[in-house]
Image: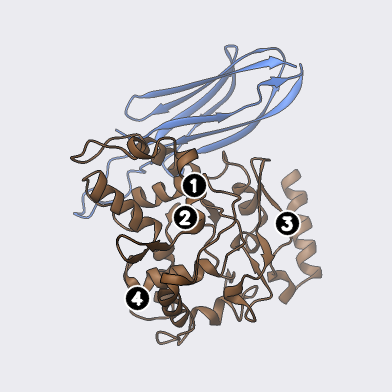
Amino acid sequence: MADNVRPRVKAPRKASAGETVTIKTLISHPMESGQRKDADGNTIPRSIIHRFTCEFNGEMVVDVTMEPAISTNPYFEFEAMIPEAGDMTFTWYDDDGSVYEETKSIALA
Amino acid sequence: MKRTALITAILGASALTAGAAWAEPVEDKLTVNGEIEVTTWTDAPAAVEGALPEVISGWHFRGTETRAMQADDFDNPGMIFVEDAMASWDTAEGDAGKSCASCHGDVEDSMKGVRAVYPKWNEDAGEVRTLEMQVNACRTENMEAEPLKYTGTEMTSMLALISSVSRGMPVNVATDGPVAEAWEAGKELYYTRTGQLELSCANCHEDNYGRMIRADHLSQGQINGFPVYRLKNTKLNSVHARFKGCVRDTRAETYKPGSPEFVALELYVASRGNGLSVEGPSVRN
């Protein structure tokens, strides 16, 4: 179980219809690869976030599969075209079954 | 597409300015979150009179992307640790059942400007105290809690939180009065060559800043940006851990973090940056 997992998202509050905006996301997570050993030589079990998705009003914007080589505190930045006002939902899926969610509302300017 | 264009531009520029100029500090201006104006290049304070013409933050010696990371709290990985420390600030620990907030209230009000004047003299204890020592004194005396490890993550995170609320304020460390003796001792250390390589702090950071030492770009060794988030070890680094690394690199036995020698050195080095803004947590490579 990963401690101190906190999702963070930076998205504009307003956009004009059809505008392309930049979205930044970051989740604090150790992303333990499963390859490392502790001081006693035992393998530290893998514990990563293996999937990240972003949906806008139910429509998928990005869907990312993440692998063990991705470093601590994964950061994603991408651009999205905003056709209408709505909610952007960000979801991170942890190996331990936890799901972290964050929602940002974007209004039309 | 944009990236390719940028790389081409950089390659083009380096071809034109190949040689020493490539390593000079970059002229740029740091504004954090578009609102905090940070002084990163200013007139030399009294402590370096005659030794340096100007004092320059390590920020100017880093690459474009690294500099940009520090200009936005969302992109600054050090801010994750600040958020962790914000949670510890409100968490009661120790036998007295107190948290930092029990006495100090809101960190943004009570700690504003604190980072800028440390290390400083503590009259009751009769010693020069670094901010780390003060945090631990608070923990053991007022909270009756265990002290934090001097260069541990919990300590550097707390320091990053305390520094973050003073960003933009000028470093203003006192060098006279009761601290004069420690300041002189720190100065002595700064100019003393150590290790098999026989290097003093000044050999790199005063005589050769702006030049490359193999793949590293030597800065003036200013500590206004500490704690520093380093991309190479993806964590916050404290001043004394950095001192230890530097002294080790001269192939010498190092002093211990928190030792009187490093406290004196921190006081002296901090005073060499009087006038630069507090930047912590800064981002370096």
Residue B227, disc: 2
For marks 3 and 2 on the same chain, the one whose residue lies earlier in the sequence: 3
Q: Kindly indicate whether the residue at mark 2 contacts the one at mark 3 (C-beta within 8 angstroms).
A: no
Depth check: B284 or A97 in front? B284
Q: Image quarter for residue B99?
A: top left
Considering only order in the chain, which callout, 2 or 4, is on the residue closer to the N terminus?
A: 2
- Pointer 1 or 2: first along the chain: 1
Q: Which residue type carries mark 4?
A: Thr
- Looking at the picture, do discs 4 and 3 lie on one chain? yes
Q: Residues within 10 Å of mark 1 (few under 14, many from 20)?
A: many
Crowding around mark 4 (Cα neighbors within 10 Å: few <14, some 14 to 19, many 20+) is some
Image: B136 above or below B258: above
- Chain in blue on the image: A
Q: Earlier in the sequence, mark 1 or mark 4?
A: 1
Location of the C terminus of chain B (image quadrant): bottom right
Residue indicated by mark 4: B254
The chain letter under disc 1 is: B
Tell me where residue A7 appears, x and y as whole percent.
Answer: 47, 30
Distance in Å between CA atoms under marks 3 and 2: 22 Å
